């Protein structure tokens, strides 16, 4: 079963069931057809020191999502490709890039290789 983010409606239900009705994590998870660990993780990540508030939780979740998927500048990836052309593995390239002050993960490099390959490139 693929993972899907909690919806605003589910977060609203969590607030009502947890704060007002005092339901357990397992009970809330069962009612929402989610695992108790999903509910626990939601409360841990998005409760802001006080009682869980669904609107604040939604804002916090959206803010975290905005940080995902940042693009690495093409110049940085081009430098990484040049290092690989010299015989370095993606892991070695990532370490070399980190030492040069432009960190890029080996997974990002692998993703670049895959994108290039899918487009008919030579990487």
Image (cartoon, rainbow, N blue to C red):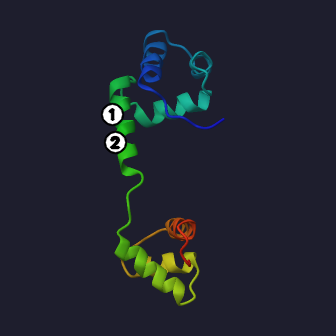
Disc 1: which residue: 59
Q: Quick check: can you spot residue 53? A: no
Q: Are marks 2 and 1 in contact (CB under 8 Å)?
A: yes
The residue lying at 44 percent from left, 23 percent from top is 11
Front residue of 7 and 11: 7
Front residue of 10 and 80: 80
The quadrant in which the C terminus is found is: bottom right
The quadrant in which the N terminus is found is: top right
Badge count: 2
Give the distance between the C-alpha atoms of the residues marked 2 and 1, in whole angstroms: 6 Å
Crowd tier of the residue under label 1, counting other residues whose Cα lies within 10 Å: few below 14, some 14–19, many 20 or above = few
Front residue of 84 and 104: 84
Disc 2: which residue: 63
Q: Quick check: can you spot residue 113? A: yes
Would residue 91 be found to the left or right of residue 101 on screen? right
Front residue of 65 and 118: 118
Q: Quadrant of residue 77?
A: bottom left
Q: Secondary structure at mark 1?
A: helix
Judge whether 80 appears above or below 10 on screen: below
The residue lying at 55 percent from left, 71 percent from top is 120
Crowd tier of the residue under label 2, counting other residues whose Cα lies within 10 Å: few below 14, some 14–19, many 20 or above = few
Q: Quadrant of residue 49?
A: top left
The image position of residue 14, as x and y in percent, is 47, 20
């Amino acid at each position: 079963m693929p993972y899907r983010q909690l919806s605003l409606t589910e977060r609203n239900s969590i607030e009502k069931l947890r704060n007002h009705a005092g339901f357990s994590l397992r009970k809330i998870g069962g009612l929402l057809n989610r695992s108790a660990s999903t509910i626990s993780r939601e409360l841990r990540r998005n409760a802001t020191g006080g009682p869980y508030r669904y609107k604040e939780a939604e804002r916090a979740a959206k803010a975290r999502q905005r940080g995902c998927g940042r693009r690495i500048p093409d110049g940085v990836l081009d430098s990484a490709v040049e290092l690989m052309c010299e015989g370095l593995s993606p892991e070695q390239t990532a370490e070399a890039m980190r030492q040069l002050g432009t960190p890029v993960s080996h997974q990002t490099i692998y993703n670049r290789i895959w994108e290039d390959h899918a487009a008919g490139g030579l990487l």
